[in-house]
Amino acid sequence: MAVLPIATVGHPELRIVAKEVTREELASAEVQQFIDDLVETMRHANGAGLAATQVLRHQRICAIEVDNNPRYPYKPRVPLTILVNPVLTPLNDDFFANMEGCLSVPGIRGEVKRHTRIHVKAWDRHGNDIEHEIRGLTACTYQHEVDHLDGLLFLDKVVDPSTLTTWDSFNQFHHDAFVERAKALVAKHGS
């Protein structure tokens, strides 16, 4: 496995919409190796997720995993999940004002409104169908990663620019209030 370089804001390829993956492509040794590298890169960077576009691969593949993540200690655990060709559908009009960060936007966080319940339809890394409902803070993570596959960064969805903050300022001035709200969301939805 290899740790891949992660593109940062301003890199034009972060704006490319990723292409769907065929079952034949997904089954190839090359794409399976890429998925292993994507996971290794996400873990190395302490990400809660990583999309293929962030490592300059324009296929609709992303990885999500939260397990004692030092960047997001308040997030509920999510087992390693590979989404191929994901389609997300909102299931309600309930939103959470999530303070998001991103490996492609180092050092900055900002508030993004995310649906609290979504339906996910995708393939796993072996081409098996995935179809289920995701709720709460985990739903926010899924939406963030799939946005990358559509050439979007969380910065594009920040409604109020005054919420933008450095990680240090977030930790000093906003952390406790946000974690309280995040824990309430997790308690409400179980994730």
Image (spheres, rainbow, N blue to C red):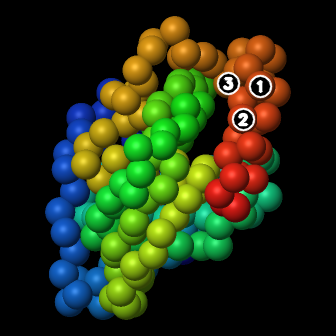
Image height of 124 relative to 104, above or below: below
Find disc 3 in the rendering and name its residue. 167
SS for dot 3: helix
Look at 37% across and 36% down and name the residue there.
153
CB under 8 Å between discs 1 and 2: yes
* Residue type, numbered disc 1: Ala
Q: Position of residue 17 (x, y in %)?
A: 19, 50
The mark nearer the N terminus, 2 or 3, is: 3
The mark nearer the N terminus, 1 or 3, is: 3
* Residue 91 seen in the current view: yes
Find disc 1 in the rendering and name its residue. 177
Distance Cα–Cα, label 1 vs label 3? 15 Å
Distance Cα–Cα, label 2 vs label 3? 18 Å
Instruction: Using residue 11 as the reference point, say whether residue 18 is left or right of it.
Output: left
* Residue type, numbered disc 2: Arg
Q: Position of residue 68 (x, y in %)?
A: 79, 58
SS for dot 1: helix
Look at 17% across and 63% down and name the residue there.
19
CB under 8 Å between discs 2 and 3: no
Image height of 17 relative to 66, above or below: above
* Residue type, numbered disc 3: Trp
The quadrant holding residue 135 is bottom right
Instruction: Using residue 53 as the reference point, say whether residue 166 is left or right of it.
Output: right
- For residue 181, the mark is 2
Look at 22% across and 57% down and name the residue there.
18
